[in-house]
Amino acid sequence: MLLVKIKTVLSEMEIKMRKSVVSIVAVLLLLSLVVACGPTQTEGTLISYGMSDDWVNLGNIWKAIEGKCGVTHTDTDMTSMEQITHLDAEMEAPVMDVADIGFDSLGLLLEKDHAMSYKAKDWSKFQENFRDADGRWAIGYWGAIAFLVNTDLVDNIPQTWDDLLKPEYLDMVCSRDPRVSTYATGAVLAAAYAHGGGEDNVQPGLDFFQELRDSKNWREGVVLNVASVQKGECPISIVYDFDGFNKRDATGLPLEVVIPSDGTVGMLFAQYINKLAPHPNAAKCAIDYFYSDEGQVLFATGYAHPGRSDVTLPDDVAAKLLPESAYGNLHFPTNLDAFSVAMQQIKDGWEAIVGSS
Amino acid sequence: MRMNAFWRSVVIMAFLAFMIIPLIATFMFSISTRWDRSLLPEGLTLEWWKTVTSRGAFLLTIKNSFYISLATAFALGVLVTPTVYWAYIKLPRGKVIFEVMSAFSFGIPGVILALALIRFYSGVPLPLINTTNILLLACMELSFPFMYRPVANALDSIDVRTLTEASQSLGGNWLQTLTRIILPNIMPGVMSGFLLVFSTVFAEFTLTNLLIGARFKTFPIYLVEFTRFDGRQASALAVISFVMAWAVSLLILWVTRKRAIPTGGGPVAGH
């Protein structure tokens, strides 16, 4: 039976052979088509890492840059550490032109020599500790560690770090793992300042978070993101102030941003040009715009604090931000090295907290 | 017996609930106005669905995702099926190599695979780095076991050697034996491999984001963009992603079932 069947099939084959050859050729053609086309990179392209449209009003900033510098911009979102790994891997075939990096990762970036020296037009207008003497980086904007409180779920809004320990906030406080998230690391540093510590002594901050976890007010097993805020899983979240305002606007929830009155940290964001940038002129044009008066105001429109303290904000922009008096106990990094060391100590110290619970 | 039937339905219901409730909840969240302080959404709206589908990037990312998923599935099917068949006939011991290879994609995290590929191929003078080509090849590497496993299982279930010898004794050459004898017999395996590869690649984020990023925006990259600022809009996209995966699976199953009939006698038993 089987043999007969195969024989019939084979005779049919003679006729259909041509057909299958045609289809194989078609498949091969399709494959070669796949191989032939890829995104082409022409002049007038600008590629950034870690600067997505929804972050600190960058959507509008990129639009302005596209018009001003005559480029088409594309961003791939990634963390500061992923950026550095990418730059390491792409030495032979560089992709990225310009990027944004957390102050705690900046030291490693400079050590690996990935940043180009370029003094932007307004470089001299930055205060000294907000810019690199060689022009490799400057602080375009900063944000302070804040509480984001859903006022429908929380009756009494916490004002200080110690408030968070009150029994009424049982299972309400969301943050992230400081070993992975920079703002969670910053939160520990802020709590350290509030308890007599600081960059040179982060232990009080670690002790505070240990206590917060032990009090069960710390929400275990919930990852802080916009969805968990929207679902009411995070009545109190520890975030950057600008991120809190943006979350409020995006969700339409009654969210209030509170700066802890007993201590907060100004978390700095540096921008730089890749030393091997494929489009260095476009990158320079973008950096110039970030640090211009116009660019700085746009950052503030996205609720971030401009890095240049000499810029005066229009009244309508300033009105949407918290008054300066809210930032009574604000601490900036004293310098790159001390800050990096403190952040690393917090990450190491967290290991012990998690290990003990 | 009655008890058996009862427990069977309990288990099936529990399983369905386990699978479907998260999807229903995701859908509900995507059409809710607000759902943070009540058991059920406070109001319903189509606003989020309108927002996510009205952007130009929506159709572009779907197109890109279909393109890379279909290309990967096609390329893997064309590459793996003849190779595995050849190994079964000529080099049975070579199967070990495939087994080891198929463990790679489970053993190596996507992040490491992507960065290793960039590091290695940026020194190779081929049009790979920074193009969709490297993404296609990486996706093939990643989803290789999903094509290999069903095809190998299908080949195990038929008597490959006897069928091949019979075909050859009647004058069939290698290509004829493969396309007209073996392939129709293992078609269900090839098809399920195709489907698995398609859906794996369609939902792939890590490799795409690291290898080429937003320069070739796929649907998962579009979805993750939304997760950063609105969970409701991201949920709408997640539901769309589910529905598309189902639709494609059903479509392919339907097409192959139709085609399986005229290929002459359906699957041939081994003996």
Image (cartoon, rainbow, N blue to C red):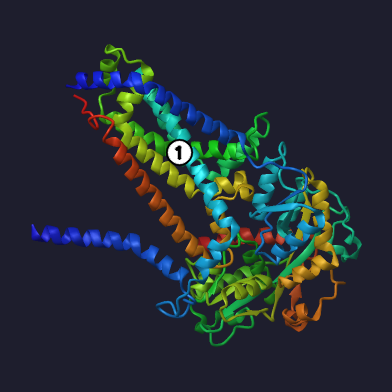
Disc 1: host chain: B
What amino acid type is highlighted by mark number 1? Ala
Viewer-proximal residue among A199 and A98: A98
Q: Is residue A137 visible?
A: no
- Say which element carries label 1: helix
For residue B74, above or below residue A228? above
Q: Residue furthest left?
A: B1
Q: Residue at x 35, y 49 (%)?
A: B250
Which is nearer the eye, A291 or B173?
Answer: B173
Q: Residue at x 52, y 51 (%)?
A: B62
- The residue that mark 1 highlights is B73
In this image, A14 relative to A143: left or right? left
Where's residue A130, x and y in %? 83, 63
Name the quarter where the N terminus of chain A is drawn: top left
x and y, in percent, of residue A205 in the image: 64, 70
Residue A337, position in %: x, y?
A: 77, 57
Specify whether residue A42 is in view.
yes
